Image: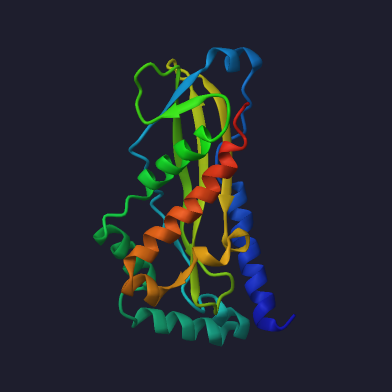
Amino acid sequence: MNLRHLFSFLLLSATLALAACAGGPSVSMTAADRTAIKQVAVLGDIKLPDAFSYQERGAGAGAMFGLIGALAEASARSSAPPSEAAQMQALIKSNDIVVGNILRAEFIRAANARDGIRFADSAAAADADLTLTVNMFGFHRAHVLGAQLYPIYNVTASMKRRDGVVLWQKTDYLMPTSLIEETGFSFSEYQQDPAKLRTALTRTAASLMSLLADKLPS
């Protein structure tokens, strides 16, 4: 493994460790609660975290060359135009892409593909509410010099009774190492064709929501 790939691996490993640690404690549903819960409302107004996790191309590569490389990297950033991260956030907003709505729709779709509890976007006649908390969101590369940017998510699904008691709670995440080729495009591709941005976000959300739905009680 050459130096570049080694550094990429270490950087990605650190990000994976951070993603794995985010989220609330795991709570399994009791048999009694499972019998009582038939329909669950998946609540909207899902907030994204204040921090937008974004890996600029070559970000961190300066560390491979010690202090001089790190200083050169910092100097370049200080005189650079708006970062890719800021441009990506603006691109999401200008194209009316609501990430929370995508996650909610994909969770309902994945959960209702299974037998058992039914999920809807309405609170009418629901026995419990489910909230999706986004602990981490952004775009990363499979390695620091890679062109393709992949959406990353860490999401906690929490089902509660109307009195606030947590009945079930699980967290899962997706990072570039666990994503298929088709979920990522280059930054310029996202700019030139924002439909690819929605596609990447939706495909990755669908994969993650399927993982969470698989943890639901049968």
Query: Is 159 above or below relative to 80?
Result: above
Query: Who is closer to the viewer here, 142 or 209?
Result: 209
Q: Colour scheme used in the picture?
A: rainbow
Quarter containing the C terminus: top right
Picture coordinates of residue 143 (x, y %)?
Answer: 59, 73
Q: Estimate the x, y position of residue 216 in percent, counting from the top left.
A: 59, 31
The residue positioned 57% from the left and 27% from the top of the image is 168
Taking the spot 50% from the left edge, 75% from the top edge, the residue there is 59
Where residue 49 appears, as percent x and y from the top left, is 41, 49
Relative to 50, does residue 210 appear above or below in the rendering?
Answer: above
Q: Is residue 6 left or right of residue 108?
A: right
Q: Nearer the viewer, residue 86 or 95?
A: 95
Question: In the picture, residue 15 is in which quadrant?
Answer: bottom right
Q: Identify whether 186 is placed above or below 110.
A: below
Outermost residue toward the right in this view: 1
Residue plotted at (72% across, 83% down) = 2
Residue at the (37%, 40%) spot, across then down = 46
Quadrant where the N terminus lies?
bottom right
Where, by quadrant of the figure, is residue 32 drawn?
top right
Residue 207 at x, y percent in the picture = 54, 50
How many numbered marks have been drawn onto this rendered protein structure?
0
